[in-house]
Amino acid sequence: MTAEFYSHIDGWYDEESRDIFRSVELNDSEVAELKAMTPESIIDYLKTHCVGICNTVSGQEKYFIQCLQFGTLKASLQVNYYVWRDRDDRNADHEALITSDEFDAVCSGPGSVLDVAFSLDGVHISLGQMKVGEICEFFNALVGDEYYPTLDSRP
């Protein structure tokens, strides 16, 4: 299946915003996974790939949660900064692996905010923050037939 979406480019430098039409080839398994995605399944994925695995020291190998990948579309969804901020407020050890309680404190529902970076064919197309529910809506719409979803992007 060819999944199609828009990438919104803010005109930070030339003051001209535009939407770029993009597409990605998905296999049947990826389509089924995207159609079945819920905020809960995104949170479960992140928690499984974060708790006891990641820490909050930027630049270390243990910092990033494993990306989701569908065809050549990669989604990096991260909670690490939010846990870092909480740890910093408590003077807690940033080298320690993230606990279930720490994860739940920053990512527990559709309104939880994540740092996101999307890339297509190895090129960054979106960077910023999104709520878990918005990410789920994008993934569901990507394989739906109601409208083409849009990712905001910065040049």
Image (spheres, rainbow, N blue to C red):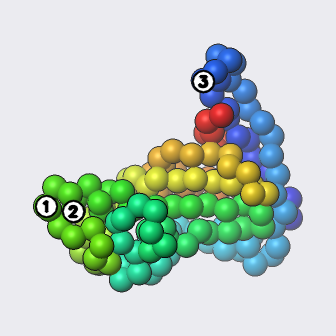
Q: Is residue 133 left or right of residue 4?
A: left
Q: Position of residue 106 (x, y in %)?
A: 30, 61
- Which residue type does callout 2 highlight? Arg
| Image quarter (top left, top right, bottom left or bottom right) of the N terminus | bottom right
Q: Position of residue 29 (x, y in %)?
A: 75, 78
Quadrant of the rendered image containing residue 69:
bottom right
Q: Residue furthest front?
A: 59
Measured Cα–Cα span from mark 2 to mark 3: 33 Å
Does residue 19 lie above or below 98 as drawn? above
Query: Residue under circle 2?
Result: 87
Query: Residue under circle 3?
Result: 12
Marks 2 & 1, CB-CB < 8 Å contact: yes
Observer able to see residue 3? no
Q: Please tell me which of labels 2 and 3 falls first in the chain.
A: 3
| Image quarter (top left, top right, bottom left or bottom right) of the C terminus | top right
**Judging from the image, what secondary structure is the residue with disc 1 in?**
helix
**Judging from the image, what secondary structure is the residue with disc 2 in?**
helix
Residue found 77% across the figure and 63% down from its top = 72
Measured Cα–Cα span from mark 3 to mark 1: 37 Å
Residue found 51% across the figure and 45% down from its top = 128
The 10 Å Cα crowd at callout 1, few under 14, some 14 to 19, many 20 or more, is: few
Q: Which mark is residue 53?
A: none
The 10 Å Cα crowd at callout 3, few under 14, some 14 to 19, many 20 or more, is: few
- Which residue type does callout 1 highlight? Arg
Residue found 81% across the figure and 75% down from its top = 28
Marks 2 & 3, CB-CB < 8 Å contact: no
Observer able to see residue 30? yes
Q: Which mark is residue 90?
A: 1
Does residue 67 lie above or below 134 as drawn? below
